[in-house]
Image: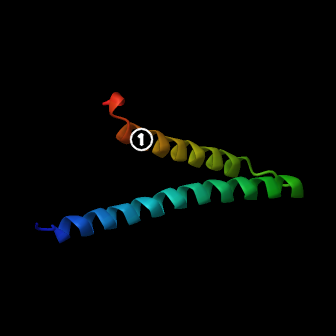
Amino acid sequence: MNIDWGALALVSVVTLIGTVVVVAAVSTAALLLDLSRARAHAGTPAPAMRVGAYAMMVVCFAMLAFGLWLIIPYFH
């Protein structure tokens, strides 16, 4: 039995990078939404932040849909 250590390292690095990207996108969406609501309560609405938050949520849902597409063989 021969283990391909290079392939294992590649999978590990890609998994780590993918996890960081997903967490950063979700965190950015939550942060923008929270900041836009805080500014709205303070009396200075920030519609651009709210649009950015919803855009990041769309990105999160797109990543989720792509992950499901990769996992479920029926969609291929």
Which quadrant, please, contains the N terminus? Answer: bottom left
* Relative horizontal placement of residue 52, taking residue 4 as reference (left or right): right
Which quadrant, please, contains the C terminus? Answer: top left
Q: Is residue 55 above or below residue 25?
A: above
**Mark 1 residue crowding within 10 angstroms, few (<14) / some (14–19) / many (20+):** few
Q: How is the image coloured?
A: rainbow
Q: How many marks?
A: 1
Q: Which quadrant holds residue 74?
A: top left
Q: Residue furthest front?
A: 1
Q: Is residue 37 above or below residue 13?
A: above
* Relative horizontal placement of residue 40, taking residue 31 as reference (left or right): right
* Relative horizontal placement of residue 54, taking residue 9 as reference (left or right): right
Q: Residue furthest top?
A: 74
Pick the front one: 32 or 17: 17
Residue 12 in the image, given as x and y percentages of width and height: 32, 66
Pick the front one: 37 or 23: 23
Residue 39 in the image, given as x and y percentages of width and height: 81, 57
Q: Secondary structure at mark 1?
A: helix
**Amino acid type indicated by mark 1:** Phe
* Relative horizontal placement of residue 26, taking residue 20 as reference (left or right): right
Q: Residue at x 19, y 71 (%)?
A: 5
Q: Residue at x 75, y 54 (%)?
A: 36
Q: Residue at x 70, y 48 (%)?
A: 50
Q: Residue at x 35, y 41 (%)?
A: 70
Pick the front one: 33 or 62: 62
**Residue receiving disc 1:** 66
Residue 61 in the image, given as x and y percentages of width and height: 53, 42
